[in-house]
Image (cartoon, rainbow, N blue to C red):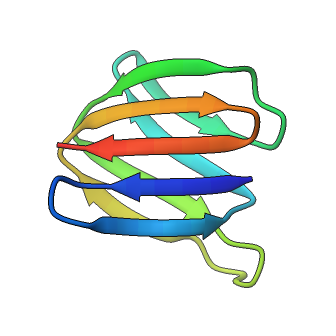
Amino acid sequence: MKLKVISPETVVFEGEVDMVTLPGASGAFTVLKNHASLVSTLTPGTMIYKTPESAEEVRREIDGGIVDVDNNVISVCLY
């Protein structure tokens, strides 16, 4: 899967991931390969993702945003 995380100022991350956990408006949710398409708002919280190269998860605090998941591409626009 490809994860693209952008903020108004810069591209925060772009690369392959095995999983992404995001703080959604109705609670945290995890996106894995072949996840159904969705669009959701994000609330302040922790975004977690794991790359194929690393055994450890990357954790990043976010202030909220919007996520679009479609065809194994996860696009996150941060506030």
Taking depth in this image into account, of 61 and 11 the one nearest to the observer is 11
Q: Position of residue 50 (x, y in %)?
A: 64, 66
Q: Position of residue 55 (x, y in %)?
A: 72, 81
Q: Which residue is drawn at 61% across and 68% down?
A: 15
Q: Which residue is drawn at 24% across and 55% down?
A: 7
Q: Is residue 79 above or below residue 69?
A: below
Q: Position of residue 10 (x, y in %)?
A: 24, 66
Taking the image as shown, residue 64 lies to the left or right of residue 40, namely left
Q: In this view, does 62 lie above or below 23?
A: below
Q: Which residue is drawn at 69% across and 62% down?
A: 17
Say which quarter of the image contains residue 18.
Answer: bottom right
Marker count (numbered): 0
Taking depth in this image into account, of 47 and 12 the one nearest to the observer is 12
Taking the image as shown, residue 9 lies to the left or right of residue 57, namely left
Which image quarter is the C terminus in? top left
Q: Where is residue 66 in the image (x, y as percent from the top left)?
A: 34, 31
Q: Is residue 11 above or below residue 32?
A: below
Q: Residue at x 58, y 19 (%)?
A: 38
